[in-house]
Image (cartoon, grey):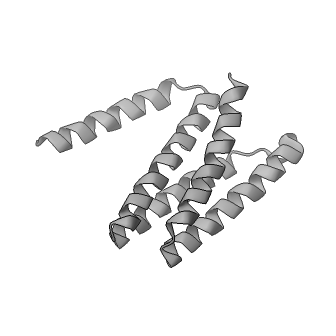
Amino acid sequence: MNAMAALRQYQTVNTQAQVTDASPHRLIQMLMEGGLSRLAQAKGAMLHGQSAQKGELIGKAIGIIGGLREGLDLEQGGEIAANLDRLYDYMVSRLVEANISNEPALLDEVADLLRNVKSAWDAIGQ
């Protein structure tokens, strides 16, 4: 096993251990962190002309945002959950547009929105 494969294996095991031990609040934080990471990686791939990798990473970010959206309780969450639902839908549409148009500013826009949601989530605490 080469060093990169060993590192990926360690990261996978470490992430799985964190997920197993995480509170629901922390799991949402981890999803948001993962989404921001994928957006940054997608932007790098976009800027370097790596279309396949860009598309894969944007797809992963869309999946993460979809997971955040699925976790919303629209009945109990009221107006806040409804607003987040619309915001997540908007983020996904902007990511699809970014993938098609190859426009890094759209990735930045979504990352900024997700960072704002994450900072509010982080402020809630457990």
Quadrant position of residue 73:
top right
Q: Is residue 73 visible?
A: yes
Residue depicted at 36% across the width and 30% down the height: 14
Instruction: Note whether residue 67 is visible.
Output: no
Return the x and y of residue 72 as percentages of the image width and height: 74, 46
- Which residue sits at x=57%, y=65%? 106
Q: Is residue 69 left or right of residue 6?
A: right
Q: In which quarter of the image is the N terminus?
A: top left
Closer-to-camera residue (24/4): 4
Q: In this view, does 35 lie above or below 24?
A: below
Query: In the rendered view, does 57 fall on the left or right side of 97?
Result: left
Count all numbered tags in the image, as a single digit: 0
Q: Where is residue 97 in the image (x, y as percent from the top left)?
A: 58, 73
In x, y percent, where is residue 44?
Answer: 38, 59
* Rendered position, 67 above or below 119: below
Which residue lies at the image location 34% right of the left edge and 38% below the top edge? 12
